[in-house]
Each structure stands twice: as structure tokens, then as C-alpha cells.
Image (cartoon, grey):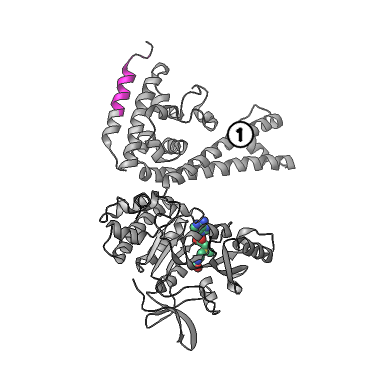
Amino acid sequence: MTKPESYQYLDIRGKTHLVTKGPPIYGEQTKNGWRVWDPTRSKLGSVLTQDIDVGLSKNAKVLYLGAANGTTASHVADVASIVYAVEFSPQPMRDLLNVARSRKNIIPLLKDARHPETYSHVVESNLDLIIQDVANRGQVKIALDNKKFLSPTGKLFLVIKARSENVVTPPELIFKSSIEELSQSYAILQTQKLTSHHKDHMAIVAEPLPQ
Amino acid sequence: MNEKDLEYAWFYQTDPEDTLSGSIAIEDGSCISPLPWPAMALEYGYAPTPDEYYSRLYDSACEAAQKSALNLTKTPDRQISHAIRTMDDYSRIENELTARLSEWMGDYIGISQDLQTSIETISTNSDYSHLDAHILSLHNQLIALSEKREKLAHFIESEMPRIAPNLTQMAGPLLAARLISIAGSLEKLAKKPSGTLQVLGAENALFAHLRGRATSPKHGVIYTHEYISKTHPSLRGNVARAFSGKLSIAARIDYYSGTLNPEVHSDLLTKIDQIRSRDGSK
Ligand SMILES: C[S@@+](CC[C@H](N)C(=O)[O-])C[C@H]1O[C@@H](n2cnc3c(N)ncnc32)[C@H](O)[C@@H]1O
């Protein structure tokens, strides 16, 4: 399942867009088989348009935690060779299954990211990238517990939603303590506050520390 | 490759041609740490090439996710359980409020009149007081509650024949829904022995008011059915045993096949007639 293309930038009707190549799924603009990756609808897309390297390289093997209805996961699958897409809620899983119909490299898993042992018999080791966007309590713990899927040279792209942890603590404090906690097992490469479309979210790119 | 590790793999001893066996392994399996499964699968002979491995994994994973997502979103028996519990809550609250209203009215107007006449007296009162307003509002609340309860009953009556056709035919939609709700689900009900089914609900205080005063607390919710309540008291035990026996068969048919089976119903009626034709006084 090798991929001919990665993501790139393309001018469509006078505007430059981030695009990937694959069948359209959510009414996004397309041109010559390239589909627009809307940064207002995807946190990963929003970070990529800020020229941050998240480790999504062509033919990467990816574990996606919190795949939801597959909006972002579909673009990832256009680039990656295989995407293990974990989502624990049945409603978005039904949409994700529809997305997987047009992308045979998405492996949908109705599992809880807090319990990696329930999918470690399916998801392979030595992955190139973990994308995590669960918007749920205990986000850092999930990243720590899923580290075992990463290759030593792999990367973690983690979205922290401050309000999911605690609605009263100021986001700044939550980001700070999240980074501290994550640093036990990961080397932080970059942190980035997300734009207005994704308020009170922070993206973190990290590398696993050797045990 | 370590044979022990292999045993944890989702593809271990699953048939490559059979996505169902793969999907069950994906759903039920577990392992502490991931391993390079694709390489191991090739060595084990599960798939000839990596592409083939991923394609089989894809099929099995889609099937597993599809099935469990459906099971979780389409659990009509669980939704109906909530509906019947809410209905029973309404009816319990109605009973309590009716008792309260009668007591209040008795003290206010005198107990000679029935409730409806007393309410009319108050609402046509020329010097309408705050007290009158409170009593009327309590009465309106009762009417609203009983309307809500009836709407829920209609909903349950229209849904139950689809959810559990045999159980509904035999017990009526409301009792059938109650049995499912006490058991927890149609599956759990279908897996209970008929003896348990006979006393289901007996321990539940919520059903005390449905049972009425006549029956002892060891009797389950099925004693509210007229098969039993219209049987001579000395024969009720026999009818209850026959009834719960057939109910448990009905629940199993509903759970495993879901189609109406007229035979169980005629069997039960014959059996009840036989029992009732015995002399109840002996
Ligand atoms: C903000 S959405 C993800 C959106 C998605 N990343 C995108 O850009 O298209 C978060 C998702 O994570 C899922 N989720 C939350 N906690 C989870 C857990 N413990 N395991 C798996 N999925 C989880 C939620 O059901 C929800 O669909």
C-alpha cells in the first residue's frame, strides 16, 4: 500500500490550500483528485498550515486516537500507508466506517484509548506516528500509555483540550502541567496554541524517550 | 518467532477466509504490548503478503466495528426498559399525589363528595383563594402526569411487537417490557431459568403497587397478568409455573430468532385451561 503522493499546497480559485489526494468525503473542494484539507475543521490541518513538522510522512504507519467521524483521519489516510483509527463512541464510528469504505488503509477500531491492551493484539508495534485528539479527561495519561506503539524514531502529535481536563483551571496552567507530565516519557519538540477555530487547544509534537 | 507471543495475535487460529472469526478475535482479544504483527502473520502463514494481511485485517476490523457499533446504538430493548421504568415512576408518583390530594380535599371540603366533584366545586368557587389555586395546580399536575404516562404506554405498545414479538403476544406489551427491564435486557431475560422468571420483580419495591394487596411479596411481576389474577387462588402457583415456563421459551425465541411462533401461545392456553378445569377447592 505505497502512496504516490504526500500532502502539498495547491492554488484553487486564487487561494492556496493544503490538499491531499483521495476520494472526497465531506463536501470539500477538489481539483484534479486533490481535496482541500480545511484547517478550520481539523486541528492537525491547522497545525500543518503553520509549517510545523508533525511527522506525517508519506507511507507512515499511524495510530489515530479519537478518530471521531474520520474528517482528519481521511486526510491522514491519503498520505499514510496504514491508519489504525481508534474511536470509542458508536455514533461517530458509523461515519468513520463510511469513510473507511473508500479508504482500505483505515483500520477502524471501536476501542477505548485508555485501555491500549484491548487493541494491542491488533495494532502493530514500531509505528511512525501517533495522532491523539480525544478531548477527554486524562489526555496525557493516554499519550503515556500508548507510547509502546511508537518506534524509537516515531512521533507523537497530541492535542490537549484544556476544558476537557478541567473547566475552572486557566488553560495556561493545564498546558503547563500537561507538558510537565508528558516530559516523563517524551521529549517535547514543539508546542503550538491553536488558532481561534480551535479555542483553548494546544498541539504538542513529541518524541518518545528511550526507556 | 515466539509461539507464546503468537497466541495473543488477533489472527492466531482464525480462518483467513472467514472475516467473522477475525472480527470476534479483534473484539474479544487483548494483549499487554503490541508486537510486529504483520511480519509475524506472514511467518505464521496467515497471509502471503503484507497487502493481503492488511486487507484481511481491514475486513475483520470493519465487521467488528460495524457489529459492535450497531449493538450499542440499536439496543431497543434497553431503550424500552427506560420507557417502562419511567412509566412506572409516573404511576407511582400519581398514586402518591392522588392520595395527597384526596387527603387535602377531605380536610378542606369534607369527605362526602368524590374527588372530581370537589375539584369542580373549587374551580367554580366565586371567592377563589390562593389555597384553591394550589389545590387545582396539584390536580392539573396529576392530569399532566397521566397523559405523559399514557403516551409512554402507547410508545411501548407500538414498539414491543417488533422488539419481542412472542413475549409481547404472551404477556402483553407492558408486562413484557417490565420483564425485560427487570432482567436488564432481552438477552439476560432469555438466559434466565423459568423459575427465576416466575419471581422476577418480587424483590423490587417499585412493583409493590402493581401487585396489589392480595399477593405475597414472593410473587413476581407476572402475577399482575390476568392468566394468574383471574385464576382461583389455590391454582395460581400451577398457572404461574406454566406461564413462566412458556414466557421463558418466548423470550428465547425472541432473542435468538425474533419471529412469531404461534405454537407456544396455543400450547400455553391449552395448559392454562387444563389447570383451571381442575377443581380449585381441592
Ligand atoms: C475532538 S473529537 C476528534 C476529532 C478528530 N480528531 C478530527 O479532527 O476529525 C474527539 C473524539 O475522541 C473520542 N474519544 C474520547 N475519549 C476517547 C477514548 N478514551 N477512547 C477513544 N476515543 C475517545 C470522542 O468520542 C470523539 O469522537
Q: Amino acid at mark 1?
A: Glu
| Residue B119 or residue B207, whichever sits in front | B207
Residue B172 vertical placement versus B218 (above, below): below
* Disc 1 target residue: B96
- Note whether ligand 1 is within 8 Å of mark 1: no
Which residue is depicted at the point 32% across and 15% down?
Answer: B278
Q: Chain of mark 1?
A: B
Q: Percent position (x, y) of residue A148?
A: 48, 59
Residue drawn at (30%, 42%) of the image: B257
Q: Quadrant of the N terminus of chain A?
A: bottom left
Tag 1, which secondary structure?
Answer: helix
* Magenta-colored span: B268-281
The count of marks equals: 1
| Magenta stretch: includes residue B269 | yes
Report whether residue B58 is seen: yes
Q: Residues within 10 Å of mark 1 (few under 14, many from 20)?
A: few
Rendering coords of residue B100 (x, y %): 65, 33
Measured as percent of width and height from the top left, residue A175 is found at 64, 65
- Residue A68 in view: no
In the rendered structure, the answer to whether residue A11 lies left or right of residue B48 reads right
- The front one of B253 and A29 is A29
Q: Write the residue at 59% across / 37% down.
A: B93
**Which residue appears farthest toward the top when viewing the image?**
B282
Is A67 included in the stretch rendered in magenta? no
Residue at the extreme bottom of the image, as rendered: A14
Quarter assignment of residue B133: top right
Q: Main secondary structure of the magenta part?
A: helix
Give whichever of A43, A53 is nearer the camera. A53
Question: Which of the 4 quarters of the picture holds residue B252?
Answer: top left
From the top left corner, tell me how far across and down residue B195 is, in percent: 39, 26
Q: Is residue B197 above or below residue B5?
A: above
B237 or A199: nearer the eye?
A: A199
